[in-house]
Image (tube, helix red, strand yellow):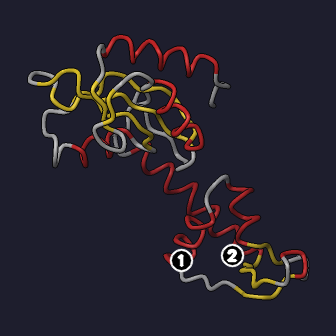
Amino acid sequence: MNDDMISVIEAGRQLERRKSTIFKVMRRLGIHAHKRRDSNSGNQVVSYLTQADFIRVKDALCESNLESREEGKNENEDTFVSAEIGVFYLIQLEPDHDPLRIKVGFAANINDRLRALRCSAPFSTVVKTWPCRRLWEKMAIDCVTCGCDRLHTEVFRCSSVGAITAKCDQFFGLMPSIQ
């Protein structure tokens, strides 16, 4: 492969984005990938883009990040740019009628997640969030809900919301800090 081409996988690594995100930006910009078999990838077809197109994708991602910050995003909000980094949340689904029924999980953007959740649980309230990597989600759920009754995939009945919050504080206190 000549030096002016970069694989979409490598572009994603350099820009700290999933390759699916790179493909979406490419599609939006009208950039078509060059597909070639690559002996380094077990002779599978790999998508490449030119360095000039890579710079266009990079600029588009930087511009969209800047726009989202300028659109009234508060610096204190629990929002993160990458879909791989976000927050682990603890939500009470019915704080007044069933305060011990909670939902825990990962969200790249807690405000968007809460908005979507309120379609089915309109009184949901966020108890607390912690910076989190997507890879930590399952382990965090298993650790902090030990001893709780599982009602659904990420919905539990606990004996104390305060105890779950303390477990989350302990768990994320042990994890490496996220920039």
Q: Is residue 145 left or right of residue 44?
A: left
Quadrant of image for the C terminus = top right
Q: Amino acid at mark 2?
A: Asp
**Viewer-side residue, 35 vs 58:** 35
- Measured from the top left, where is residue 154 in percent x and y? 36, 40
At x 56%, y 34%, the residue is 139
- Measured from the top left, where is residue 41 in percent x and y? 84, 75
The crowding category of the residue bearing disc 1, from other C-alpha atoms within 10 Å (few below 14, some 14 to 19, many at least 20), is few
Element type at marker 1?
helix
Farthest residue toward the left?
Answer: 97
At x 38%, y 11%, the residue is 163
At x 50%, y 48%, the residue is 66
Element type at marker 2?
helix
Q: Is residue 61 left or right of residue 68?
A: right
Which label was assigned to residue 53?
2
- Measured from the top left, where is residue 164 in percent x and y? 39, 18
Which label was assigned to residue 29?
1
